[in-house]
Image: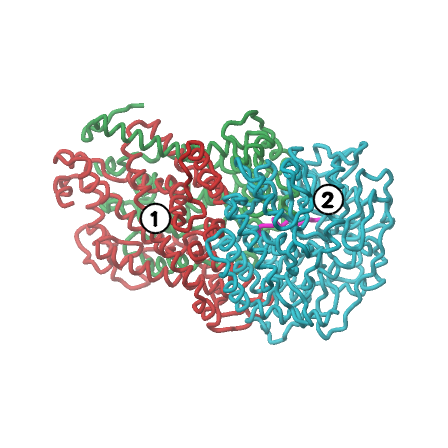
Amino acid sequence: MTKVTVTGGAADVSAIDAQRSSDVGRRPTAPAGRGDRGVRPGARRGHRQRIRRDRLLLLLMVPGVAYFVVFHYGALFGNTLAFLDYVPFLGIAGSEWVGLANFQQMFGDPGFWNAVRNTVVIAALQLVFFFPAPLALALLLHSLVGDVVRRFVQSVVYLPHFLSWVIVVALFQHMLGGAGVVNGWLGDLGLGSIHVIGNPDAYKPLVVAQVLWKECGWATIIFLAALSQVDEQQYEASALDGAGWWRRLWHVTLPGIRPVLVLLVVLRLGEFLDVGFEQFFLQRQAVGPEVGEVLDTFVYFTGFANGEFGYAAAAGLFKGVIGVALVYTANKVAHRLGEQGVYQR
Amino acid sequence: MKHSYPAWQGRPGPAIRAAKAFALAVVVLLVLFPLWTVVATSLAAPQDVIANGGWVVWPQRITFDAYAEILDGGVVTRALLVSAGVTFVGTALSLTCTVFLAYALSRPGVYGSRPVLLLILFTFLFPPGMIPLFLVVRTTGLFDQYAALILPFLVNVFNLVVMRGFFQSIPAELLEAARIDGAGDLAILWRVVLPLSKAVLAVIGLFYAVAYWNRFFEAIIYFNDQSKWPIGTVLRQYVTGGADMTGEAVATAAPQSTQMAVVVLATAPIVLVYPFLQRYFVKGVLTGALKA
Amino acid sequence: MAVHLPRRSLLRLAGAGALAGVAGPLLTGCGDGAKRDVGNAGKDLVPWPAHVPFSGPPPDAPGDDQGVQPLYLTYPQQVARSVNDTVGDGSEITAMVITYGAPPKPAEANQFWQAVNKALNVNLKIVVVPDAEYSQKMTTLMASGDDLPDIIMFSQLALPRAAEFIQAQCADISDLVGGDAVRDYPNLANIPTRAWKAMGRINGRIYGVPLERPAPGNSLFVNRTALNQADVPVQWDTEGYVAAMRKVTGGRRWGIGGSKSLFGGVGAITYHAGSLGAPNQWRVDGGKFVSTLTTGQFEEAIGVMRRLAEAGAYHPDSLTLSATDLQTFWHSGTVLSLTDGFGSVAPNTLAKINGRFQLDLGRPYGPDPTPWRGTGFFGHVAFKKASPDRIKLLLRVCNYLSAPFGTAEYELANYGVEGVHYTKNASGIVPTALAGAENNTNLPVKYIGVAPAVLYLPGQPEAARAVHEWEKAVLPKSVADPAVGLRSATQSTKAAELNRIVGDAVSAIVFGRKPVSAWKDAVTQWRQAGGDKLAEEFAVEYAAAT
């Protein structure tokens, strides 16, 4: 890391290096001074002056902020449903206040905790596999010189994203099912059969593999964009230092896209318990709730499907609180590592 | 098309290149084979599909009947226009609002930016439920309006945060240099930030476009007038089966070939956008800027 | 919260009514303190509408009170008129209905829609709700206050608090259709009483018009050709049935197929439970409701299914197949039998089978069978509160669209305009190409009003006759679900959960993931999760209704 910035030379300050320095500058507490890159002049003045100074940027915020106020904060009252026995045609005002009854019902149900356990395991597996795989694919694509091949492969691998889970599950079934294509081949060759679909032990790897197949190519897109921002001159400098492919990867590429990686991980953690619904709803039957029930399917059966919106809202709040804790922690860790995370200290 | 390696990279050995080619071939095959099955099934005669157990790899007879059936009557054509309009307008609006917001939030020390960012992140963790959002849509008079497919989804927090992250990675020297040249905040956005952010603009634009294109559920909830349905909602109706189908649905279900034709028709237009965006994924955009 | 909800046919499969009418503990009061009582216990009950059957063209074989449908091998030569007066006043009527079809072409380009509007003399606006999103759309509709369509169709899915909603917001039509008053609407008077009963009263009053369906419920569809080739007789006993399924399995063909949705509730087991004499959801025992799940016959049925699975007679992917894929395997002859709703006895099914084999329905195998009847209705329509004249107009619309088989009105509502949407030849109705896009599936007027179903499969008389024979053999022994049409004071908040408990346990035991002994635990779990409570509530309602 240090080596790179040194060899990079003063004239071409690397993107990463520049960003580091701007990090410092971005903090409002940083001392204002000589061309200090981040802090806007007059950061310490009064509110009114600061508003006047930033009026253009504040104006730019207006449409987006208005959107969040109307469609998110306007609908945020919906979370009070968690404390109601909500009846749609009676409205929120007309529905009965039940306090924590929805939460008590939820937390008191062993099925809920079983679902949480499964969700955490699957989410962790997704996290472990789901970041390296598209990154590796992106690096592979990025390393290609032939434009035609690269574009072709890029355009192909992102296609499965557009298929619905119903079709993806049906296709996996068709290939790997007990009466599927693969078992047909194995049977013809007299090699016995594999038991993947409907095998509780294989379930978690299977659902992760499905996510990988469906979303890996799609997820490479953002990495490719990040890779395009990496300063080419650093590669040159690094190569001049005799660094091989691995060292360039380690010292140039990964640090270059690290801020984006951190963002993606933190954001994913915010939705940690959202492992998806339809994929699991379609397949849980075959392995039973012990293995196949995730939080969303559980809440579907106990809440949504019966119009128990209060209960469903309680589950939503639970997920949100977990998300807050994870994002807060992850952001802290990111700061420790010298990254900005999704928000500054 | 020039196939030259940058000076610093050198040509990798044959073993490496073979490994790469192999890896890519495997990935492409893993993806293409099932997708090909979908397309082939849509081109097969319904009876051949049934005889084959639901999926066809090589159709014995190629027929476009399934497509003709869907496109007959003008409903799908109209819905395609609706979707194209919603996607185009929505993406333009979303991208604009996201860029503005991300830019303002990416500049250090802007008044109120930290609380605004935190309040926005909060909405990411506590998304609105179906009924509250529906009530907001009704109250704001968007019911049965095309805008109901756009405004409730105007800014996506994920996209906003990612775009802000990219904006922040632009070296502060460049912004400062522009400022010294007398550029205001808007000019900096226009002349420095956006030209250096083509890749992320392309990506986020794609994310928005795909989201708008694929959205089907909201049209059912927010519209009573089905002539305003977008393509996703309309075509979904051909896939009656979905996952569960009994009695009433079986009696009217479209053949599998029609269902696969629906998949192809619903995705083909939006899938074709990406290859046009790829030219923005150029390497080393920042390098040139820094040199200048 | 951002969960996207899939379709809810798993409830439909449960033979609704029973499991779908379950109640939960939390909901004794409704908000504003005013307890909304939708039950019928202790109320003055409006008499059911009189049943005045239409005497139409004579069938080739008659129907009967057991639910056997009149059989028509060919289309009647002469059709009658059932509506002579003007229906509408040219006003606009909005109707919200479920749909299983593609969106309709707009009225100005849709000759079928135009013809319906002309015949009814109204400007019919139809809001179609895809079945997969039906419950969400209805929920938001209920949250919309007074802004309702004139006609609202309710499927028999237990929509949470639907009865309370209807009572609060929809028109009480008791005085217009109760008892002999229904004679003003002869086609509504032709709807059999069992359909009205299945819809049920709310607080003793009538709030809607039912959409009738034939009596048979989930039934076993069999590939008769394959069974004949294996010398399997039409009548079989338990051992004979198991042996037959074993015999026909082999060489990438399976005796029986299941799907995720069938195993998501009691769908997959209905045929077996009915064969072995388990009650249809409930048995009324000295005024008490006893769940079929607690009976020895039901457990025996699980045992038979387990034996079939152990013998490999089930398609190996029976728990994960989508219903769509299962249908394909069935039509192609890969699986030789499956359980499905009686609604699958339809021209579309025969078209997909395309003569590959002879379609038949399986006879129950047990010594003392109790084949489960369906609920006898698909759902019902209710009307937004309005002046009596307006309600009468809406009833006349329903009356027109409920015109029985063998009338000119039926032809329009079901086949469209002669020469445009269909032609007639010796074998009967032949749809034109245009009928592929303009029909009552895409423009689902059949969910505003529908004729009692007869057995007529255009161009497939032998299939129709086979189904008729089966109905005659099976329906006399069949039993109805005593809970259909009953309201419980606290309705519908546990249906999906209870259904899931049953489906999960049946799946696990049948496919050997759990021992048969696990069934006892599942039943206990089911009772505690709301099953017992449900039994109590039904018992109270039942006593009041009889």
User: Residue C446: in sight, yes or no?
Assistant: yes
Verify whether residue A203 appears in magenta.
no
User: Residue B147: in sight, yes or no?
Assistant: no
Residue on which disc 1 sits:
B162
Q: Chain of mark 2?
A: C
Q: Amino acid at mark 2?
A: Val
Magenta segment boundaries in residue numbering? C125-133
Residue on which disc 2 sits:
C467
Verify whether residue C132 appears in magenta.
yes
As rendered, which of B127 and A17 lies closer to the eye?
Answer: B127
Per the rendering, the colour in which chain C appears is: cyan
User: Residue C249: where, in percent of width, then height?
Assistant: 55, 40
Instruction: Name the residue at 68% across, 48% down.
Output: C363
As rendered, which of A322 and B117 lies closer to the eye?
Answer: A322
Per the rendering, the colour in which chain A appears is: red
User: Residue A129: where, in percent of width, then height?
Assistant: 32, 46
Disc 1 to disc 2, C-alpha distance = 62 Å
Per the rendering, the colour in which chain B appears is: green
- What mark, if any, has residue C392 been given in the picture? none
How packed mark 1 is, by other alpha carbons closer than 10 Å (few <14, some 14-19, many 20 or more), is: many
Q: Indicate left or right for A141 with C305 as reference.
A: left
Is there a contact, CB below 8 Å, between mark 1 and mark 2? Answer: no
* Position of C367 relative to B9 (above/below): below
As rendered, which of A244 and C385 lies closer to the eye?
Answer: A244
